[in-house]
């Protein structure tokens, strides 16, 4: 069936989500995260987009953008192609990194704009990766709270802060109170996948009935080893870094499997 055309936002503002193909990690270290955001900053200038928010997780990223001198699909293609080139060069991989098509939804009201930015900032908290929004380094929360963040000057925070107060100090304080309210916000038909503890991960791996001790996996021939690792990678809430630790296998081997 042909793809349905995206609904055009009258405000020009979109909540966008990119996810790794087969839910694989797309960010493995701080260099990857910074490179992705630096890429957005480069196209922010070229495409004249406004960047209202972001949150980089292991295998996906949320963005809150206003399109500029081209449609949002073109801008996202530029960002994606550039980052994939960097990723493939760094990790010596080939092929697709992101799922076939990014997800997006239009933002038409101030109320929903605030819901989405809070949803984005609370993503790592609800997934079990952070205790508070401000303790997750790779989100725009730092910028909204008036803290230093990288890359400098990526965030356009005046629109959202202006919905709270004209005075910037007051606006930041009120935004922080709003941003940390516990909620059941759901956006983009997305669902939070809670990170498993190592004990929970071992229980889920055992359910696969692999028929051998986990210590033996790293000693298997490459083809058989990769088949088993691929099975383990399908477990929701289990990160590739965690798999590497549990199996005592290089993380590089895990994400190439």
Image (cartoon, grey):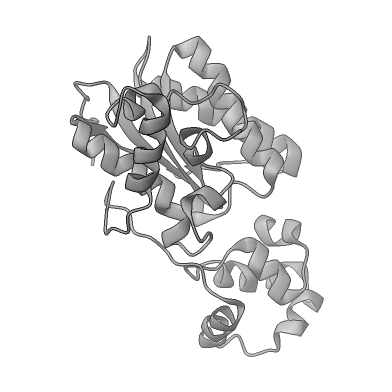
Q: Position of residue 245 (x, y in %)?
A: 72, 71
Q: Quadrant of residue 72?
A: top left
Looking at the image, is 253 positioned above or below residue 203? above
Looking at the image, is 66 positioned above or below residue 91? above
The quadrant in which the C terminus is found is bottom right
Looking at the image, is 105 positioned above or below residue 79? below
Taking 250 as reference, is 236 left or right?
left
The residue that appears at 74% across and 56% down in the rendered structure is 252
Q: Position of residue 75 (x, y in %)?
A: 44, 21
The residue that appears at 32% across and 22% down in the rendered structure is 166
The residue that appears at 69% across and 43% down in the rendered structure is 30
Q: Nearer the viewer, residue 111 or 127?
A: 111
Q: Position of residue 213 (x, y in %)?
A: 71, 89
Looking at the image, is 62 positioned above or below residue 82? below
The residue that appears at 19% across and 21% down in the rendered structure is 10
Q: Position of residue 9 (x, y in %)?
A: 22, 25
Taking 82 as reference, is 55 left or right?
left
Q: Nearer the viewer, residue 102 or 124?
A: 124
């Amino acid at each position: 069936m042909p793809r349905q055309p995206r609904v055009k936002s009258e405000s020009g503002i979109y909540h966008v989500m990119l996810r790794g193909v087969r839910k694989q990690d797309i960010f493995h270290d701080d260099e990857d995260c910074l490179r992705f955001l630096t890429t957005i900053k480069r196209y922010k200038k070229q495409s004249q987009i406004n960047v209202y928010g972001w949150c980089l997780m292991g295998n996906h990223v949320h963005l809150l953008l206003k399109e500029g001198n081209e449609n949002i699909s073109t801008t996202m293609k530029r960002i994606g192609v550039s980052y994939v080139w960097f990723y493939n060069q760094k990790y010596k991989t080939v092929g697709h990194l992101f799922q076939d098509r990014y997800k997006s939804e239009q933002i038409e009201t101030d109320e929903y704009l605030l819901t989405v930015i809070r949803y984005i900032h609370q993503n790592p908290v609800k997934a079990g990766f952070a205790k508070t929004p401000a303790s997750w380094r790779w989100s725009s929360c730092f910028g909204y709270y008036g803290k230093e963040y990288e890359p400098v000057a990526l965030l356009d925070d005046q629109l959202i802060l202006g919905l709270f107060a004209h005075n910037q100090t007051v606006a930041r304080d009120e935004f922080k109170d709003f941003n940390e309210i516990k909620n059941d916000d759901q956006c983009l038909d997305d669902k939070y996948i809670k990170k498993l503890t190592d004990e929970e991960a071992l229980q889920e791996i055992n359910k696969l009935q692999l028929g051998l001790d986990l210590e033996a996996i790293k000693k298997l021939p490459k083809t058989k080893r990769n088949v088993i690792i691929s099975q383990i990678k399908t477990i929701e809430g289990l990160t590739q870094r965690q798999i590497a630790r549990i199996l005592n296998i290089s993380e590089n081997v895990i994400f190439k499997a």
